[in-house]
Image: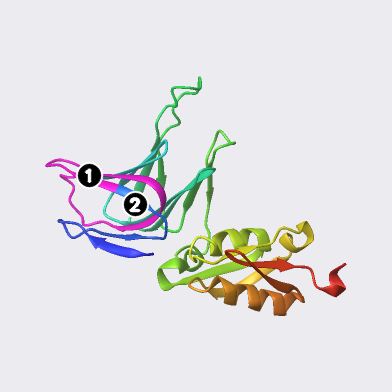
């Protein structure tokens, strides 16, 4: 489920599905630890009490601002919506890698750190698309069906599967409600001439007759 919490200083955190974080407010520091999942932070300005989010190896320091952090096993995203944030990577003790210098993001910029890449990438995704989950939507712009299914499966108890590589590679664009994965599967099946087959915990998308 998704929920919004208001902290004692008026900062708001909107948690996406399957998200865990802990809050540690001290006199001179507002510290949040995002263990996994995705959250949108609307930070009340207070220069005397920095607001810092720790996620994986990244420390995101808010400078009066709205931003989003997504912590997945294979990647970590920080997207700045308004204001400024500074992202610092802590040195990884296991690897002989020096800590990279801090990155200050501009509004609309996203920092993406993938596990298999040393340096983070900066890009500018459509903010509407990246924050669609707050509206109960998932937006895809030429995503593969495999990517779209992985995203939709974060929200529903019913899971969608697309095991056939030809099916998984199909391209998907559009806006879909996150609350109903089966309806998503039905729409995709109609668009691409696929079959929807019931499974134990949801549905599978399989190639229709004309795809073979």
Residue 63 location in percent, x, y?
A: 28, 49
Left or right placement of residue 195 versus residue 39 in this view: right
Q: Say which element carries label 1.
A: loop
The C terminus lies in quadrant: bottom right
| Residue that extends furthest to the top in the rendered view of this protein | 96
Give the quadrant of residue 121: top right
Of labels 2 and 1, earlier in sequence is 1
At x 62% / y 58%, what residue is drawn?
147
Residue sitting at the far front: 200
Give the vertical position of 31 relative to 207 (above or below): above
Q: Mark 1 Cα within 10 Å, few/some/many (few <14, many 20+)?
A: some
Is residue 165 at least partly visible in the picture? yes
Q: Which residues are magenta?
A: 22-49
- Front residue (pair 100, 22): 22
Residue at image position (22%, 58%) is 11
Does the stretch in magenta take in 44?
yes
The local secondary structure at tag 2 comes to: loop
Q: Main secondary structure of the magenta part?
A: strand
Quarter residue 10 falls in: bottom left
The circle drawn on residue 84 is 2
When the figure is inspected, residue 184 is found, relative to residue 96, above or below; the finding is below
Find out whether residue 94 is within the magenta segment: no
Q: Which mark is residue 209?
A: none
Closest to the observer, 158 or 96: 158
Q: Name the quarter where the N terminus is drawn.
A: bottom left
Q: Are marks 2 and 1 in contact (CB under 8 Å)?
A: no
Q: Which mark is residue 50?
A: 1
């Amino acid at each position: 489920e998704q929920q919004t919490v208001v902290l004692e200083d008026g900062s708001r955190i909107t948690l996406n599905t399957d998200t865990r974080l802990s809050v540690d407010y001290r006199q001179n520091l507002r510290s949040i630890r995002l263990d996994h999942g995705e959250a949108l932070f609307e930070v009340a300005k207070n220069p005397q009490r920095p607001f810092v989010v720790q996620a994986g190896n990244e420390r995101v320091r808010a400078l009066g601002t709205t931003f989003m952090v997504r912590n997945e096993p294979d990647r970590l995203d920080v997207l700045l919506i308004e204001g400024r944030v500074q992202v610092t990577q802590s040195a990884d003790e296991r690897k002989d890698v020096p800590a990279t210098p801090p990155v200050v993001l501009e509004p609309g910029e996203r920092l993406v750190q993938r596990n298999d890449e040393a340096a983070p990438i900066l890009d500018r995704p459509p903010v509407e698309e990246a924050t669609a989950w707050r509206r109960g939507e998932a937006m895809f712009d030429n995503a593969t069906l495999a990517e779209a299914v992985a995203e939709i499966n974060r929200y529903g108890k019913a899971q969608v599967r697309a095991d056939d590589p030809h099916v998984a590679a199909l391209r998907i664009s559009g806006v879909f409600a996150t609350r109903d994965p089966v309806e998503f599967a039905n729409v995709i099946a109609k668009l691409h001439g696929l079959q929807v087959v019931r499974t134990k915990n949801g549905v599978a998308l399989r190639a229709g007759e004309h795809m073979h």
